[in-house]
Image: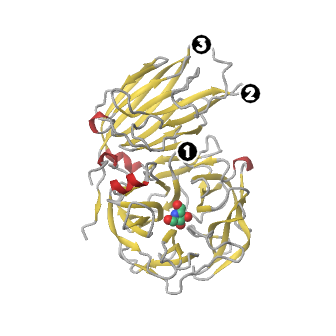
Amino acid sequence: NAMFSWQRTSYHFQPIKNWMNDPDGPLFHMGWYHLFYQYNPDSAVWGNITWGHAVSRDLIHWLYLPFAMVPDQWYDINGVWTGSATLLPDGQIVMLYTGDTNQSVQVQNLAYPANLSDPLLLDWVKYPGNPVLVPPPHIKPKDFRDPTTGWIGPDGKWRITIGSKINTTGVSLVYHTTDFISYKLLDTLLHAVLGTGMWECVDFYPVAINGSIGLDTSDDGPGIKHVLKASLDNTKLDYYALGTYNPVIDKWTPDNPEEDVGIGLRLDYGRYYASKSFYDQYKKRRILWGWINETDTESDDLEKGWASVQTIPRTVLFDNKTGTNIRQWPVQEIESLRQTSTHFENVLIEPGSVVPLDIGTATQLDIFAEFETELLESGGEEEGYSCSGGAVNRSTMGPFGLLVIADDSLSELTPVFFRPTNTTNGTLDTYFCADETRSTLAPEVLKHIYGSKVPVLEGEKYSMRVLVDHSIVESFAQGGRTVITSRIYPTEAIYGSAKLFLFNNATGVNVKATLQIWQMNSAFIRPFPL
Ligand code: DQQ
């Protein structure tokens, strides 16, 4: 279908057609990365949920495989929903997933590869004794889904956690198991946060306080914090918090109760949901996937014949400079797509100006940009700006940054920018934002102004990495402390008409920008020649 064909991405994972949502059960096995995903084989809207399956050598080029699991049993006939993989020490692979039953009850099911010596893991067996878990008495039948990867506690038993809600409190139930067939529910919860509603797609994993390697899900001990993430069904936003896990009582406590799960930090402040991480035992890193949903209308999706994209997989590390957040960064393999690059040094952007960056077509880019500001007037009195006014809202020190996917006449553009602002206690806060308000001339598209505060430490320049891929913009500030994904629908700024600009809409600072910009090759994402 040529309709809206320019909206297809060139190096992000997406199926050839139809609907996709959550990433499922990511794992590495015998030289291949496996990605499963919620998929509707029949239409570009959610339904008939089946597990799509694709493999990759490098997380960038993908081969689609036959479906891993289809809804064909009473315990998953209404959908093979989200799940996670656990790699056992003896080499077995356990897949736990939620089935929506013939009675629309959410149950947990077990599946495993028919042939572990097949690097492609083509055939999956559903355990004949499924379901292995049904909703416990105090949990409603539709509030029990998305089992995590298992981890081993000090008593040698496996644990998994499953998101739910009790009244309006979001909770994470903990089960112990030794065989993934029979389970014991703990009386206590891993964690609960008032008012956050149903927790979907809980993710729970350790991060090293010092060091640049990822940790396996069972790793624990001194020098480790644990990340707890929940996807809030109420708002469709992914929140996480850093905290301490006590494996003896299976309780997690947030470092900062004011930044608890669901009320504090988000993994991505843009269009992003149902994320899931896994430990890559091959390259010793934790990798995070996330689902980028559409923001156009359902009828447009049906017309174009597809919906949704996955983010570029990101490595996750604890930020030992701030100590208060994780850092996300596109996996290093994405750099293999870099082609010609252009360097710009100390480009001056005066207040109220737009500077074109002469790099030709700007639809597939990897941009690294650093900004320094020079105060022209004292703007000490101004305070309390944030992202909410967008890129048109001028203040003394911001906004400044990039205009991506913009046409020459600037009829369509998406500003990705910093906005430093004074606070009432005399310090400087910096916001990192993306403003989709003018991203498209198309009507009936949701256009958001996204963003949040980003820590900028003493001696650091403002820096951003931006991946541009036709209709997806993934932006990482200050080494990945704050991340924003935009889903945009340009109609003019497409193909050769899509350009890149710098802008400074501050009133009181000169901005100097230094950039390295790579043209990006397309990835091979195609059916496996079976
Ligand atoms: N998507 C799945 C559920 C999950 C939700 C169904 C999150 O398992 O809770 O497609 O997007």
Q: Is residue 156 visible?
A: no
**Which residue type does callout 1 highlight?**
Tyr
- Which quadrant of the rendered structure holds the C terminus? bottom left
Q: How many marks?
A: 3
- Say which quarter of the image contains residue 194: bottom right
Q: Is mark 2 within 8 Å of ligand 1?
A: no
Picture quarter with the N terminus: bottom left
Name the residue carrying label 3. Answer: 377
Picture coordinates of residue 518, whole percent (x, y): 34, 37
Q: Is residue 270 above or below residue 514?
A: below
Q: Earlier in the sequence, mark 2 or mark 3?
A: 3
**Residue at (53, 51) in percent of width and height:** 316
Neighbour class for label 3 at 10 Å: few (<14), some, many (≥20)? few
Secondary element under disc 1, as helix, strand or loop, is loop
Single out the residue that lies furthest toward the left: 529
Across and down, in percent, residue 287 comes to 49, 56
**Residue at 44% across, 31% down:** 402
Q: Is residue 396 visible?
A: yes
Q: Position of residue 128 (x, y in %)?
A: 49, 87
Question: Which residue is disc 2 drawn over?
Answer: 425
Q: Return the disc, 3 or 1, that comes first in the chain's sequence.
A: 1
> How is the structure coloured here?
secondary structure
Q: CA distance from mark 2 to mark 3?
A: 20 Å
Cα distance in 3D space between marks 3 and 1: 32 Å
Q: CA distance from mark 2 to mark 1?
A: 26 Å
What residue is disc 1 on? 269
**Mark toward the start of the polypeptide (2 vs 1):** 1
Res. 201 image quadrant: bottom right
Q: Is mark 3 within 8 Å of ligand 1?
A: no
